[in-house]
Every structure is written in structure tokens, then in C-alpha cells.
Image (cartoon, helix red, strand yellow):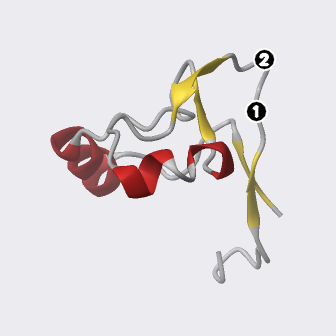
Amino acid sequence: MDKNEYRYCKPTPDGEIEIDGEWLDFNSGYVTRVLEKLPCQGSRDPWRNTQNYKKDVLQLRYGRITDKELKFI
């Protein structure tokens, strides 16, 4: 971001995103007490929290940071 003189980046949906369940998929007491305060997840990437470690590692190491739904300003 410094190289391109961007000050911040902002997630910006490209079209409609349907809500597809809770952000976390486990029901520990400390989680269920605050579910209404946690974000929901969307029905498609990049708005999903899959909690899949292998997928996350591959995406973070080899994936692209540029995305049509991430605006750099």
C-alpha cells in the first residue's frame, strides 16, 4: 500500500450477497452468548468464513491480494 500511496483498503461487495449463517460454526457458551454481536457470513467467497486451515494457508501464501471486491484508496 505504501508503494502505491494507498491510505486504506475497503471491502466493497460487487453485487448482492446473501447471508448464509453464523460466522462461527460451533456452539460454546461464550460464543452463543455473543452471536448477535458477531458478523454473519455471506453466501460466496470472499465473504465466507470456512474455518478451513489448509485453504486459508494456500490462499494467504499463493493467492492474490487484488480482488474486484477490495478497493484500495
- The residue at the point 64 percent across, 80 percent down is 3
**Helix or strand or loop: what does disc 2 sit on?**
loop
Residue lying farthest left? 54
Q: Which of 17 and 38 is in front in this view?
A: 38
**Label 1: how many Cα within 10 Å (few below 14, some 14–19, many 20+):** few
Residue type at mark 1 is Pro
Q: Which mark is residue 72?
A: none
Give the residue furthest to the right: 73
Q: Mark 2 points at which residue?
A: 16
The structure residue drawn at horizontal position 56% and vertical position 45%, both measured from the top left corner, is 35
Disc 1 to disc 2, how far (Cα)?
7 Å
The residue most toward the bottom is 2
The front one of 6 and 43 is: 43
Q: In which quarter of the image is residue 27?
A: top left
Residue 21 percent location from the top left of the image: 53, 23
Percent position (x, y) of residue 41?
A: 57, 32
Residue 24 percent coordinates (x, y)? 42, 41
Residue lying at 61% horizontally and 49% vertically, measured from the top left:
38
Q: What residue sits 69% from the left and 16% below the top? A: 18
The N terminus lies in which quarter of the figure? Answer: bottom right
> Looking at numbered disc 2 in the image, what kind of residue is underneath it?
Glu
Query: Pointer 2: residues within 10 angstroms few (<14), some, or many (20+)?
Result: few
* Quadrant in the picture for the C terminus: bottom right
Horizontal side, residue 68 vs residue 5: left or right: left
User: Marks 2 and 1: in contact by CB < 8 Å?
Assistant: yes
Residue under label 1: 13
Q: In which quarter of the image is residue 59?
A: top left
Residue 49 image-quadrant placement: top left
- Element assignment for label 1: loop
